[in-house]
Image (spheres, rainbow, N blue to C red):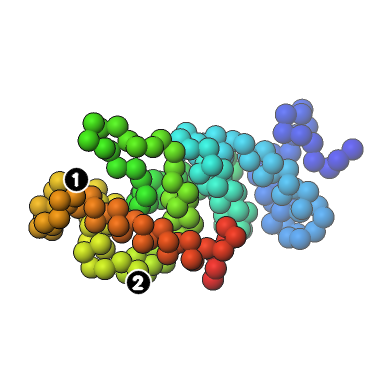
Amino acid sequence: MSDIEGAGSAGAVTDEELVRRVTGDPGSPAAQRASAELFGRYRRRVYIWCFRYIGNHETAMDLAQDVLLNAYRSLGSFQGDCRFSSWIYAIARNRCFNELRRPAIFAEEPVEDGVRSADREDPAERMVQRFDEERLLALIHRHLDLQEQAVLWLRCFERMPIETITTVMAIQQSSGARGVLQRARRKLRSALQRECKGGEIRP
């Protein structure tokens, strides 16, 4: 019989005991078995938690993987003064909050009748989510002119209405800030595609 019983069995090893086995002898076969059992218990739970916050299947899957990886790397900091479940859900909550604070650079803009022109996430938005804020801002500064940078910032980071941006920026062209924003997004999308190769971000 395995030295680790299933989570639902009468002799189930507690999460906290599994943590001790993982951190007590890192890299050993016993630690690897304990790690597989521990994170196997939470893989779906963490995904469900993330999905409830984010509401998008693919993003929730990515976030859940991040949470599990961060939890594994941080196991040494788990002090046992709370339940392991509370600890890993706190990591998940913080990761989801950070994700929700990220600007939606390529979010669809409402058209004149108030209906969005598409209901699917732009693939470029998923590329943006893989950049940290510092790299994203560097990309924006490198590839957009000053007016495009300002409009993108006001709309996507400050959430300012398009009409207000047009007035504040004194944009004279007929399409106003919307036209500048569309141009900025096209240029940024092309830059992102050049930065990414085969789905992986180049260093």
Is 155 rendered above or below residue 143? Answer: above
The residue under label 1 is 161
Q: Badge 1: how crowded within 10 Å, few (<14), some, or many (20+)? A: few
Question: Is residue 61 shown left or right of residue 1?
Answer: left
Q: Residue furthest right?
A: 1
Q: Nearer the viewer, residue 134 or 175?
A: 175
- Residue 163 visible in rendering: yes
Q: Nearer the viewer, residue 146 or 117?
A: 117
The residue under label 2 is 142
- Residue 78 visible in rendering: no
**Residue drawn where x is 26% and y is 63% of the image:** 149
Is 119 rendered above or below residue 162? Answer: above
Instruction: Say what amino acid the circle numbered 2 marks.
Output: Arg
**Residue drawn where x is 60% and y is 60% of the image:** 198
Image location (x, y in percent) of residue 37: 73, 43
Question: Is residue 28 shown left or right of residue 165?
Answer: right
Q: Nearer the viewer, residue 24 or 192?
A: 192
Under circle 1, the secondary element is loop
